Amino acid sequence: MIPVLLVMLLQLSTSLHKTEKPLCFLKTSPSLSRNGDLVIGSFLPMHSVEVSNDIGKGLFQSHPDKSCRDYKWLHKNYQLVLALVFAVEEINRDPNLLPNISSLGFHVYNAYHSDERTLESSLRWLSGQGQLIPNYSCLWQDQPVAIIGGATSALSVQMGTLLELYKFPQISYGPFDSKLSDKAQFPSLYQMTQRDSSLHHGIIQLMVQFEWTWVGLVTTDDMRGEEFLWNLKGDMIKHDICLAYTEKLPVSERRHTESQDMFMPRILQSSVRVIIIHGDTDSLMILRYSQPILHYILKKVWITTSNWDITMRPQWNDGYSFHGALSFSQMTKEIPAFKTFLRTVNPAKYPEDPLLKEFWCSAFKDLEKLENEELNECSLNTSLETLPLHIFDMAMSGLSYTMYNAVHAVARALHEMLLVTSERESIRNEEIWVPQPWQLHNFLKKIHFDNSIGDQVFLDDTGNSEAHYNILEYLFFQNGTEILVKVGQFIPNAPYGQDFFICKEAILWAWNEPKAPHAVCSESCSPGFRKTPREGEPVCCFDCSSCSEGEISKQMNMKYCMKCPEDEYPNKERDHCLPKTITFLDIKEPLGMTLVCVALLFSMLTALILGVFVKFCDTPVVKANNRILSYTLLISLTLCFLCSLLFIGRPTAATCLLRQTTFGIVFTVAISSILAKTILVVLAFKVTKPGSRSKVWLQPRVSNCIVFLCSGIQMTLCCIWLGISPPFPDTDTHSQPNQIIIECNEGSVIGFYCVLGYIGFLALGSFTVAFLARNLPDTFNEAKFITFSMLVFCSVWVSFLPTYQSTKGKAMVVVEIFSILASSAGLLGCIFIPKCYVILLSPHNARVKSIWLEKSKGLANG
């Protein structure tokens, strides 16, 4: 690295040695000097210049003057020079600092943001001559001891590469850069500025306050810009904020036209309303020279960082571009004597300073817009207070404050070094104390003092605290007046709630808008909706989808909808939950009351028919159909109608246990009775041979055994069901979105369908036997009525199964009650209504039945 650097320096010095009149550097090198026993060198960005487009090897092969262009004054940066002068004069007046040194001097050089010019200026300062002579110094009286420079990280690195060869201490007053803290790479470099590692947190909180989620970023294309971008993105992810684009601007050279062609069209054409600018004034000067006044028309809001002076610009009327911008400015205390010093500064006070006169005339010429005014014609008795903000600021800037502390730090290090040297060896009064620059490092590392306003000053990187920020709004009015108004502050590491403050009412938004501009990729999702990410796009770009059934979202821009509690349901808008109503088939409601009335009516009708059969028990019709079976069937049908009442009302443990078991047993008794009657009818016509042993099957105890056997099997199934998993009261919160259904859980579903299936099996058997006996003589045959009744019964229960499965809540209970009533009424109507008709209204048929009965007895007696 060093041999290559020396070769480049030799080429550079040879080129300059052949130049008889280095016109470019006659203007600016050195810019200002004040002799002293000890001299501090300083490189300050006072002029901007557009350099050539040569890069790499061609940069050092081209003639230096050929790449020099017209330079422009950076007027606001002249405050750095005045801060340096003020600090040196303050030190020279202090009898307690450097008492054995007559004076402290300084050399000020212009720092171009160019590898070529920075290296050239540094070498010229080291050689002490107009011509560049590497590794040789002509300085014998004004001995340089340290360098204060590095307005940007790039300048610090460029200067440090050369100064490190000679172990010159370099105090950087520019923005803090963690890369420069690497002592292995930069052992002779010290940073004065406070750390800004928390700045991105403040910017994120600002965006959160105004709900800006879609922003752009303009930053420098270096490690410092990359570190800020990395930290900003990490914080953005936590708050769902996205970068629409990132523009990285080159910092090593200023190629205005090329840079404008690269990034300005993208910024202008983008619909992004909020743009963050991160970087220092010198590195981002390219943005100032490239930005048109169209920004004002495009209505963009700029968020700038403290190291970029928003008021500095090449043209006086360019302030519209950044009207309404919000800037994070590092908090600094005002040194009272400095403002007084600025008020008294003029070329008449410092006649030996040609740089001040040149600045003075340039600044006031720009103010008066006198294009052809000569330097010696400008007024020298005016005050800096009359200059507008974009040319000069009477308030001490952050860089000037750091410059003031840097000069005092060097002076105090020299003072400590002088004390140590005085203790070790005596210095004669006539002898001038000349320290070596490399000897100063041990003292600079230990510097820690309170400045004139009580602030602690460190040169050790570990001692630098986090910077605090004022949030300023930049306003530019039509009459050319511009001001910075404090609208908030950001104090890192402060307690939560006290670290960030913004006064929204104090902000005067540009373009006369009453509220903050809208900066989002997608419109907000209202309550009741959730954000659905768009595939392949950032998280800030999304669609709004309605919450699913049973879910709500109470706030704007919810990522997920949340389910309501089981006892609540969403309202129509799905933005809050309502309590569910408890529902069951209540006897007090019309439907429940109607079913109760129907069940009681049919049960009374069945009881009435039973009464008729009992009263006319000796009639042939009653006798012909086995009175005991008829009585049993009628009693079971009465119970079937009444068992439906167990399904009405709020379910309890008792009703849940009795519902299905009672229904299953009484229906089994009814169907088994019908089955026994059907078998007897068939046997009555089939067993006709006198003396046949088959007649024993016509005895009443056989039919009774059929009923008891079939009913016993059903009772066994019910006992097993109740023993393994009995029914119990339960709540259904899912079937109906706005209701909590109180129901009976069947427990074992297999047990329930076994009971129901067994009834179906008996019904199918009865239907089959009756169907086989359908061709017997009509006069003496009731098999057709039984067949039709079982057809009705089976039809009802076959249709019950799918309907029961597809309904929930009260409807399911109503379906089962209806099936019970309908099937029971079908049995009653098809079997007993014709018999009642015969008994009560058709005596002729009764006589026929009597004759049939007598014949049957005769056959039976043989």
Image: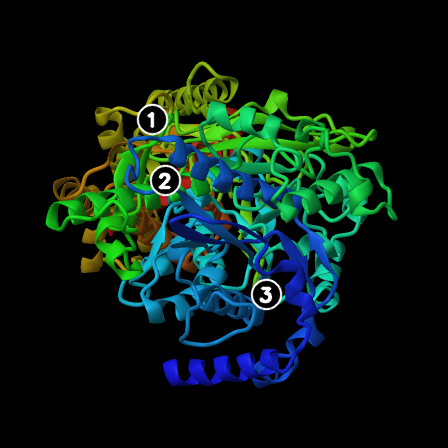
- Disc 2 from disc 3: Cα separation: 33 Å
Which element is circle 2 on?
helix
Residue 384: x and y in percent read: 67, 31
- Disc 1 from disc 2: Cα separation: 13 Å
For image coordinates 58% across by 81% down, the residue present is 60
Q: Sort mark 1 into few (<14), some (14-19) or many (20+) by Cα contacts within 10 Å.
A: few
- Of mark 2 and mark 3, the one earlier in the sequence is 3
- Disc 3 from disc 1: Cα separation: 39 Å
Q: Judge depth for marks 1 and 2 and give the one in front.
A: 2
> Mark 3 and mark 2 in contact (Cβ < 8 Å)?
no
Amino acid type, label 2: His
Q: Nearest the camera: 842 or 325?
A: 325
Q: What scheme was used to colour the molecule?
A: rainbow
Q: Answer left or right for 590 relative to 797.
A: right
Q: Sort mark 2 into few (<14), some (14-19) or many (20+) by Cα contacts within 10 Å.
A: many
Q: Answer left or right for 559 relative to 428.
A: right
Q: Identify the mark at residue 250; answer none if there is no mark.
A: 3
Q: Which residue is mark 1?
A: 454
